[in-house]
Amino acid sequence: MKTEAKTGSNVMYVLRLALTLLIITAVVAAALAGVNSVTAPIIAALNEAKTQQAIETVLPGGGKEIDIPAVDVDVAVAAVYQGENGYAVQVAPSGFNGEIDMMVGIDNEGKVIAISIINHTETAGLGAVAAAKTSAGEAFRGQFAGLSGSVGTAKRGTGTLDAITGATITSEAVCTGVNAALAVVAAMG
């Protein structure tokens, strides 16, 4: 008889715990959904502003979004913008810690105008230098101006560009993104 009473109280205890956890989980999920509904439009607006700024950085005068041509590249091509002075191509090559969302400006002769890194998750002090507003970051990005054809780093033997010290994978990823953008523009004629 005592074991039956003890078993019944154990069941009730477990049910109370389960119900308490269910209520807590529901409240937290509702709070997260509320925060997301408030912040999602703000985050989208900030991302759009960063993209527009990147277009202006790589293609003076900006451009209008056009259809992405069919081209076989190993990089995600997010968008292509056409302006009077050339094209801005948004690509996302895989870096050391994830995708590097970047914009590449290419003039009407098929030469790189400039590159701008919109978003990345590269290692601070190493791969993050590629996007940094420092002399090292600007020097790395500046190497691409005027290039055409295929670009790569001298460190990997695929080109002549200087890689960022300690960030060869990031440097090559940026080169891959530039090569993809050049291929997209070349496919448009």
Image: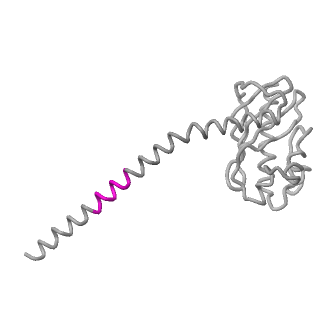
**Does 24 appear in magenta?**
yes
Magenta segment boundaries in residue numbering: 17-26
Q: Residue 73, how many percent across, how many down?
A: 73, 39
Measuring 68% from the left and 55% from the top, which residue is drawn there? 97
- In the image, taking residue 146 as reference, residue 82 lies left or right, namely left
The residue sitting at the bottom extreme is: 2
Work out which quarter of the rendered image holds the C terminus and state it.
Answer: top right
Query: Which sits in the foreground, 77 or 102?
Result: 102
Work out which quarter of the rendered image holds the N terminus and state it.
Answer: bottom left
> In which image quadrant can residue 45 be found?
top right
Q: Residue 143, how many percent across, how many down?
A: 90, 46
Q: How many marks?
A: 0
Q: Is 52 rendered above or below residue 11?
A: above
- In the image, taking residue 116 as reference, residue 19 lies left or right, namely left
- In the image, taking residue 126 as reference, residue 37 lies left or right, namely left
Query: Main SS type for the magenta part?
Result: helix
The residue sitting at the left extreme is: 1
Q: Is 40 rendered above or below residue 66?
A: below
Q: Residue 159, how many percent across, how many down?
A: 89, 49
Q: Residue 69, how many percent across, how many down?
A: 72, 27
Measuring 72% from the left and 47% from the top, which residue is drawn there? 100
> In which image quadrant can residue 50 be found?
top right
Measuring 55% from the left and 40% from the top, which residue is drawn there? 40
**Does 5 appear in magenta?**
no
Q: How is the image coloured?
A: one colour
Query: Which sits in the foreground, 117 or 53?
Result: 53
Query: Which sits in the foreground, 76 or 80?
Result: 80
